[in-house]
Structure formats: structure tokens, C-alpha cells
Image (tube, rainbow, N blue to C red):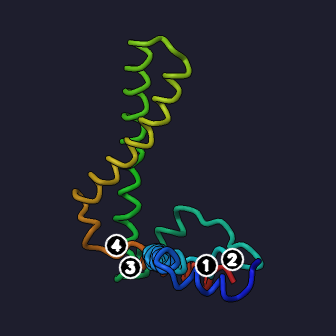
């Protein structure tokens, strides 16, 4: 039933090759998650940090500090987009349907779309596409790990 000939024939087939290529494609696209594994898969969690700790890092690191500061400013664009999107779509849905579940779903959907649009506006306005924000975040986590020990 499940002998090795059947298994090897399935992996050598067109579909097996396609599945392997698909796995490789997504493994490459999601490889950025490995940057954070040493901070997320620890025996003991890192202690929480405050805004003053982040400001201290920004002042102490002339390379990654300004990038982290810009990335933190981009969050405000996303939050503003979330509020505007959620409230406006929920109000529109409520005005025309008077359906509580429709307004609630519109609120959730508008919040997600608003966050997305807000992040895109921040990306262009603050020129985040020119910065390596992930490297700045990883450097902050490394700095916080050293400082908290």
C-alpha cells in the first residue's frame, strides 16, 4: 500500500515537483521570520521595554536609530488609517442598512483596509522603502537583550 516505490513515484511526478517548488518558493518568501526566532523562541522571554528605552536606543545608535524612529512614526499613519477606515465604513454600512452585524463587519474590514492604506501612505511619505526597518528592529532587540541581562 504505502511502499517506497509509490512514494518516490509521487515525488518524481509533475505534481510532486510542483509541490516541492511551491514549498521552496514560500520558504524563500517567509525566510525573514528567521530573523526573529532567537528572540521569540527563548527559554525566558525578554522583559518589556518602554518608550524611554526605545528613545535611548535611537540616541545611542547613529545607524539604526533614525531608521527605528522613522518606523515608529509610520505606525501613526497606520493607526490613523485604521480609525478613519473603520469608522467611515461602519457609519456608511449603518446609514444604508441599519444592520448591526453588517456595521460590525464593515468596522473590522474598514480597520484592516485603513491600516493597509495608512502603511502604504507612510511607506511613500517617509520613504520606508529606502530603509531596512527589519535590521533596525533586530538591532534594537539585540541591544535590549544585552541591556536587560
Q: Residue beneath label 3, please?
A: 64
Q: Residue beneath label 4, please?
A: 66
Task: State the count of labels.
Answer: 4
Name the front one of labels 3 and 1.
1
Residue 45 marker: none
Quadrant position of the C terminus in the picture:
bottom right
| Residue in the foreground of this view, choosing between 54 and 17 | 17
The span from disc 2 to disc 4 (Cα, nearest Å) is: 28 Å
The span from disc 2 to disc 1 (Cα, nearest Å) is: 5 Å
98 vs 85: above or below? above
Name the front one of labels 3 and 2.
2
Figure quadrant of residue 11: bottom right
Residue drawn at point x = 34 percent, y = 64 percent: 70
> Is label 4 in contact with label 3 (beta carbons under 8 Å)?
yes
Q: Residue beneath label 2, please?
A: 41
Q: Position of residue 55 (x, y in %)?
A: 46, 68
The span from disc 3 to disc 2 (Cα, nearest Å) is: 24 Å
> Is label 2 in contact with label 1 (beta carbons under 8 Å)?
yes
| Residue in the foreground of this view, choosing between 14 and 107 | 14
> Is label 3 in contact with label 1 (beta carbons under 8 Å)?
no
> Is label 3 in contact with label 2 (beta carbons under 8 Å)?
no
Would residue 1 appear left or right of 83 to someone viewing this image? right
- Sequence-wise first label, 3 or 2: 2
The span from disc 4 to disc 3 (Cα, nearest Å) is: 6 Å
Question: Counting other residues with Cα less than 10 Å from the Cα at mark 4, is it few (<14), some (14-19), or many (20 or more)?
Answer: some
Amino acid at each position: 500500500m504505502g511502499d517506497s516505490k509509490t512514494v518516490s513515484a509521487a515525488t518524481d511526478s509533475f505534481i510532486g515537483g510542483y509541490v516541492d517548488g511551491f514549498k521552496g518558493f514560500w520558504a524563500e518568501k517567509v525566510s525573514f521570520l528567521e530573523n526573529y526566532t532567537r528572540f521569540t523562541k527563548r527559554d525566558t522571554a525578554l522583559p518589556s521595554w518602554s518608550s524611554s528605552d526605545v528613545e535611548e536606543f535611537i540616541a545611542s545608535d547613529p545607524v539604526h536609530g533614525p531608521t527605528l524612529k522613522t518606523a515608529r512614526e509610520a505606525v501613526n499613519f497606520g493607526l490613523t488609517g485604521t480609525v478613519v477606515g473603520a469608522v467611515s465604513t461602519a457609519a456608511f454600512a449603518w446609514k444604508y442598512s441599519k444592520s448591526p452585524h453588517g456595521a460590525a463587519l464593515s468596522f473590522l474590514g474598514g480597520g484592516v483596509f485603513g491600516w493597509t492604506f495608512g502603511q502604504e501612505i507612510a511607506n511613500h511619505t517617509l520613504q520606508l522603502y529606502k530603509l531596512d526597518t527589519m535590521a533596525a528592529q533586530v538591532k534594537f532587540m539585540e541591544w535590549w537583550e544585552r541591556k536587560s541581562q
